[in-house]
Image (cartoon, rainbow, N blue to C red):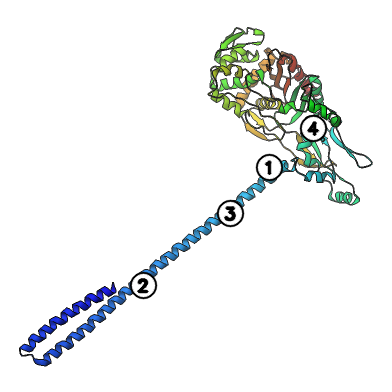
Amino acid sequence: MRKRKEEKLEQKNKVNKKKRNDNTVKSSGTSLGKPSAKKNIDSYNAESDENHQTINKQVNVQSMNGNNHEFSQDESKEEIKKEHTNREIMLVTYIFIGLLILTLGYFIKFIFADSSEVINNAYNQRQDLLAEHIVRGDIISSDGKILAHTNVDSNGKETRVYPYDSMFAHVVGRFSKGRTGLEASENFRLLTSNDNPISKIFRELSGDKNKGDNVVTTLNSNLQKVAYDALGNHKGAVVVMEPSSGKILAMVSKPDYDPNKIDTLWEGLLEDDEKNSALLNRATQGLYPPGSTFKILTSLEYILENPDYESYGYNCEGKGLFNSVIINCYNNKKHGQEDLKESFAKSCNSSFAEIGTTLNIRSFRKLCNTFLFNAPIPTSMIYNRSSFVLTGDTDKSEIPQTVIGQGKTQITPLHNALIVSTIANGGVMMKPYLVDHIENYNGIIVKKYMPEIYNSLITPDQSQILTSFMTEVVENGTATALKGKKYTVAGKTGSAEYEANKPAHAWFVGFAPAEKPEIAVSIIVESVGTGSEYAVPVASKIFDAYFKNK
């Protein structure tokens, strides 16, 4: 651009020079003479020098402006590059901080939540190393009875002994042939010694093993014996709970086995020719149709959907057709005209099948899920999940059977105990637990476990309504054998049909005293008949034993 301007200016100067030459010629033709021409030439040269100086100044200014512009652009690029670099550094810093927080979070979760599970894992070889230095601690009942102990002979050979033989076989578990029950879940604690450090060092130096900590359970040996004996030779399970805390007071499963003889019994238990499934803890892993005990939740759903539930009425004729399915009452008994509470107390299948046809199934499924169907139970015990399969898209023909506790619904005795305990506890479900505290072998408490709330599932008013329904079952319904005691009982019987031409499973769930519950039970007796005839007597013996000295 500078060159172009110089060329234009030079061309202009040539034109001016030519004009001045012409004028000079003309002037010399008149009377100006030579001196005048020289003067004009000098004037031109001076003007030309002045123009060149002006051009040079303009070019220098433009050059400076260009240089300033280029410098400004370079400076701007440098600032952008610096800003971009800072942004990358900040991004990397944030990522690093985020990863650090996640790592710290994982370690905190591991320490407070997952460490016990990892440590107690059967594949954790560190447990075997602990056993080389520590004698396994005792498992003790809440009333001070030893449920599992390790004998050490003069040669140092250790033998795990179970003083109550098969009575606690499933809940306490076994040590040999694969750890189960509390022997499995509390394995690390039983192999940890919190004895005096000086005593521990002295034993180690002398070549003796230290004594492991003791696990003191919530189990009551007297209630366990009563429940065990009451179930007799029948297959089934019993769970006894304290509703206000979630403590498991007794847990029985039959058929059972003697863990003291597990080495000799093992092959026969595995072959299971008689189909007894004696290794299975039916209390936590047995899945059964809930039978009429499920009418507790069916009633609750109807009450939630119908604030005027007290105006409900139905005339029972012993059977009926509902959604193209015939539903019979037990022995086709005609209950006549009845309201909702009477239908519940008499366990009228026809009435509840009628109720089922009016329910919002999506809402009902949500309620069942709230009560932990199709969901994990908040416990460290090994268990199977209960299931409720109805959805809003389910064929309507499945509804009548499901709402009376038949169909495809399945539940464990432990889960049924949780449901009835929630009602007894004003609608608040507590987390069930088996360990009260850990103590060293001198009896000094190392760790104490406290009751934990799982969730508030229904209101106190709703639980009170259900309690009144369950009290009516005892006063005027299917559990009158529990009437007239020195304590009041609220409960629900059930007869769960599971196979054609075979007796039903007998259920009873309930709690006492009805007005201020202290104890709740869940009982199932397999393939015997009605809950009134077989499960209620078991409950009666347990309640009597509990309130005997109160």
Looking at the rendered structure, the kind of residue marked 3 is Ile
Per the image, label 4 sits on a secondary structure element best described as: loop
Give the residue displayed 16% in from the left and 80% down from the top.
16
Name the mark on residue 370: none
Q: Is residue 8 left or right of 390 when viewed as pictured?
A: left
Residue 396: where, in percent of width, then height? Answer: 54, 18
Q: Quadrant of residue 548?
A: top right
Q: Residue at label 3?
A: 97
Q: Earlier in the sequence, mark 4 or mark 1?
A: 1
Looking at the rendered structure, the kind of residue marked 2 is Asn
Per the image, label 2 sits on a secondary structure element best described as: helix
The quarter of the image holding the N terminus is bottom left
Q: Nearer the viewer, mark 4 or mark 1?
A: 4
Looking at the rendered structure, the kind of residue marked 4 is Gly
Query: Are dots 4 and 3 in contact, CB under 8 Å?
Result: no
Looking at the rendered structure, the kind of residue marked 1 is Ala
Query: Are dots 1 and 3 in contact, CB under 8 Å?
Result: no
- Label 3 Cα crowd, 10 Å radius (few <14 / some 14-19 / many 20+): few
Q: Residue at label 4?
A: 173
The Cα atoms of the two marked residues, 2 and 3, are separated by: 45 Å
Q: Nearer the viewer, mark 2 or mark 1?
A: 2
Per the image, label 1 sits on a secondary structure element best described as: helix
Up-down relation of residue 18 to residue 341 (above or below): below
Residue 182: where, in percent of width, then height? Answer: 77, 35
Per the image, label 3 sits on a secondary structure element best described as: helix
Q: Residue at label 1?
A: 113
Q: Is residue 243 visible?
A: yes
Q: Earlier in the sequence, mark 4 or mark 3?
A: 3
Name the mark on residue 67: 2
The Cα atoms of the two marked residues, 4 and 2, are separated by: 90 Å
Q: Earlier in the sequence, mark 2 or mark 1?
A: 2
Q: Nearer the viewer, mark 4 or mark 2?
A: 2
